[in-house]
Image (tube, rainbow, N blue to C red):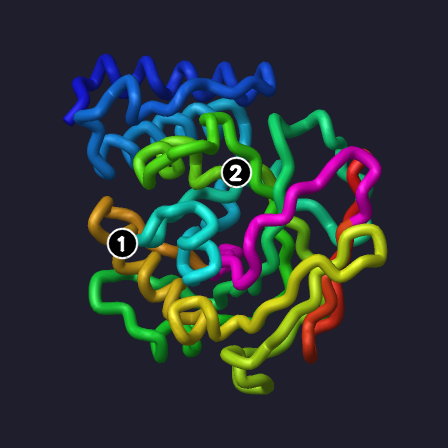
């Protein structure tokens, strides 16, 4: 495990990388003794500093919940990060490309909670009961740590590579659709680049929310009513360049879109 001083130093480095839009060398190369708990401690320092500066916690994201994402990253277990108010973008928006160090897009379902979820022992049925509705979401990934050879402790420290989320489509109560079979087509500049089905996320996207609630309980935290929770991607990350328009069409949920300039 790392010392408190080392954890603070890494958090400082990542805050600076976010501010300056730079990439830092892998943490695991420089700190081979790092643990997952160290990584979440680094993430919490980063979060606390953003909140102290005036930001507001509005949700969480879950990453690496599908085989396609695990194969794309070489990481075989889920992780999570936080979503702050300045990370939420409306569908149809023009997004500043230079806001990020790099841009990749994932296709996800966002769960909006009507009730809190306090672990441990949260089940998929608790999640469905607590969910007000689901909506389409694009996650904009923004990595501050070099991508090649990253491990899970690198990604967790970097807030699970979360840059922003784009919400759109139409809100649908969870009982109106079989969430496992919600499919999506992902377009870049009017060309289909990828597609997927939400059941690729742990067999049912609500399973990711249950995993998160129980994982947060290990850190003395919980999911609160009103939070937006991204359940995990069911497409592989798609690289985006300046000028690209990204559009995703979901079965039964409408669409979500944005343009990068």
Residue segment shown in magenta: 226-245
What secondary structure is marked by label 1?
helix
- Give the mark nearer the N terminus: 2 vs 1: 2
Neighbourhood count class around disc 1 (C-alpha, 10 Å): few under 14, some 14–19, many 20 upward: some
Dividing the picture into quarters, in which one does residue 211 lie?
bottom left
Residue 11 visible to the viewer: yes
Q: Which mark is residue 59?
A: none
What secondary structure is marked by label 2?
loop
Residue 62 visible to the viewer: no
Report the front residue among 126 and 20.
20
Residue 168 on image: x %, y %: 71, 60
Q: Residue at x 47, y 27 (%)?
A: 146
Q: Is 246 within the magenta?
A: no
Is residue 151 found left or right of 132 in the rendered image? Answer: left
Which residue is tagged 2?
56
Is residue 110 found left or right of 80 in the rendered image? Answer: right
Residue 251 on image: x %, y %: 68, 77
The answer to the question of whether label 2 and label 1 lie on touching residues, with beta carbons closer than 8 A, is no
Reply above or below: 63 against 198: above
Which residue is tagged 1?
215
């Amino acid at each position: 495990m790392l010392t408190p001083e080392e954890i603070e130093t890494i958090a400082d480095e990542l805050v600076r990388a976010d501010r300056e839009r730079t990439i830092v060398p892998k943490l695991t190369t420089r700190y081979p003794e790092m643990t997952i708990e160290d990584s979440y401690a680094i993430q919490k320092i980063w979060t606390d500093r953003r909140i102290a500066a005036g930001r507001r916690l509005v949700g969480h994201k879950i990453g690496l919940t599908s085989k396609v994402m695990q194969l794309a990253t070489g990481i075989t277990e889920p992780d999570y990060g936080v979503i702050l108010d300045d990370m939420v973008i409306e569908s149809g928006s023009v997004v500043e490309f230079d806001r990020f160090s790099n841009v990749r897009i994932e296709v996800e379902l966002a769960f909006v909670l009507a009730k809190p979820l306090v672990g441990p022992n949260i089940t998929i049925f608790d999640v469905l009961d607590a969910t007000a509705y689901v909506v389409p979401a694009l996650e904009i990934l923004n990595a501050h740590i070099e991508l090649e050879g990253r491990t899970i402790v690198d990604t967790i420290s970097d807030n699970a590579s979360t840059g922003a989320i784009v919400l759109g489509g139409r809100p649908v109560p969870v009982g109106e659709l079989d969430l496992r079979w919600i499919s999506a087509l992902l377009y870049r500049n009017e060309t289909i680049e990828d597609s997927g089905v939400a059941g690729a996320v742990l067999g049912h996207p609500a399973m990711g929310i249950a995993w998160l609630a129980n994982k947060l309980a290990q850190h003395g935290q919980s999911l609160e009513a009103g939070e937006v929770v991204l359940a995990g991607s069911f497409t592989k990350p798609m690289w985006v360049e300046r000028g690209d328009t990204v559009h995703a069409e979901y079965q039964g949920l409408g669409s979500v879109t944005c343009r990068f300039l």
